[in-house]
Amino acid sequence: MSEQIDWYAIRDRAKEWILDAGEQLKEALKSTLQVETKSSPDDLVTNMDRQIEEFFIQHIRESFPGHYIISEEGYGDKLSELKGIIWMIDPIDGTMNFVHQKRHFSISIGVYENGVGRVGLILDVMNGDLYHCVKGSGAFQNDSKLPPLTETSLNEAVISINATWLNQNRRIDPDIVRPIARQCRGTRSYGSAAIELAYVACGALDLYWSMRLAPWDIGAGLILVEEVGGAATRVDGSPINLLKQNSLLVGNPSVHQTVSNHIQQEIESGKFVEQYE
Ligand code: 2AM
Ligand code: CA
């Protein structure tokens, strides 16, 4: 099946659409956004999340009938397996940043074939950086090929982690997280999982740690990170399931290993980490 599919052509179409969508988002920031909340006061959606998702879905359905779509705002398909070709689309990753910061938000497109990541694109909309890859031919930041990740120790590592997980919360015992935040060289938090994964791929971050992400947040970024030799699992060490929510530990393989070992020891000593099905 795979021989007949031109992944480079798919990458090129996706690139046209993502750049067009990026311009639409920049334009939208010049006028008033319609902001609503979804499941909670910090779960935001705007008119533009919906508009951009519909834009992608219309183009994909027209150009690639027979492909499936998993997307955040519900205009895609309801899938119970990863069979066939599936586009994982987040029209705005970091909607809170889009609304409040007006920067550090992205558009994320990952294309999978029978569960294998083939094409990934992440556009950091406001600074214009486009991270992209076709499986097997390396990952790129704009026109520059990204080098493979090299070994790094925890005390030289920059780690992205949200402050939520350092305080009492219902997904992880913060006593597991705090020693890592202390031992690493520095912590950061950008508020767009796709940008954070792109930063892992280009070496700006050595690890990204999050307790709850959706398939569209990570679909593209996982393909980019794999292309540069990064490691990715759930926080409890189990494999990621792209049909569900996951916790995520992704980074430089040496730092990922060190932090994974620490978490495993803490789980064995009885500390709590949310386990996903
Ligand atoms: P979003 O902006 O597309 O919702 C913020 O730390 C990161 O987590 C963003 O990538 C954000 O994606 C994602 N995120 C926020 N709330 C989430 C939720 N309830 N489930 C999954 N991902 C979420
Ligand atoms: Ca989103």
Image (cartoon, rainbow, N blue to C red):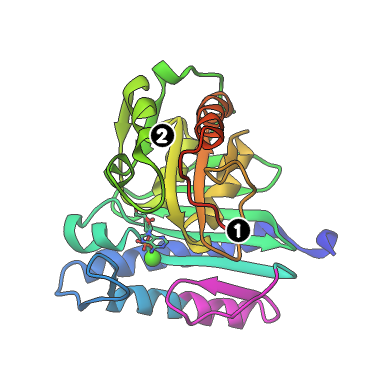
Determine if residue 34 is in view. yes
Looking at the image, is 230 positioned above or below residue 127?
above
Task: Out of 244 and 111, give the one closest to the viewer.
Answer: 244
> Where does the image place residue 88, in percent across and percent down from the top left?
55, 65
Residue at image position (47%, 34%) is 202
Task: Out of 235 and 140, give the one closest to the viewer.
Answer: 235
Q: Which residue is mark 1?
A: 11
The three-letter code of the residue at mark 2 reads Ile
Residue at the extreme front: 270
Quadrant holding ligand 2? Answer: bottom left
Looking at the image, is 144 positioned above or below residue 66?
above
Asked whether the beta carbons under mark 1 and mark 2 sit within 8 Å of each other, the answer is no
Give me the disc on residue 176.
2
> Where does the image place residue 264, in percent across and percent down from the top left?
56, 33
Looking at the image, is 192 positioned above or below residue 61?
above
Does the beta carbon at disc 2 come under 8 Å from ligand 1? no
| Secondary structure found at label 1 | helix
What segment carries the magenta color? 56-81
* Mark in the foreground, 1 or 2: 2
Task: Out of 79 and 121, give the one closest to the viewer.
Answer: 79
- Counting residues from the start of the chain, the first of labels 1 and 2 encountered is 1
Quarter of the figure with the N terminus: bottom right
For the residues marked 1 and 2, what is the alpha-carbon distance in whole angstroms?
40 Å
| Residue 79 counted in the magenta span | yes
Residue at image position (58%, 27%) is 257
Does the beta carbon at disc 1 come under 8 Å from ligand 2? no
Task: Out of 4 and 172, give the one closest to the viewer.
Answer: 172
Residue at image position (64%, 63%) is 10
Looking at the image, is 15 positioned above or below residue 268?
below
The three-letter code of the residue at mark 1 reads Arg
| Secondary structure found at label 2 | helix
Quarter of the figure with the C terminus: bottom right
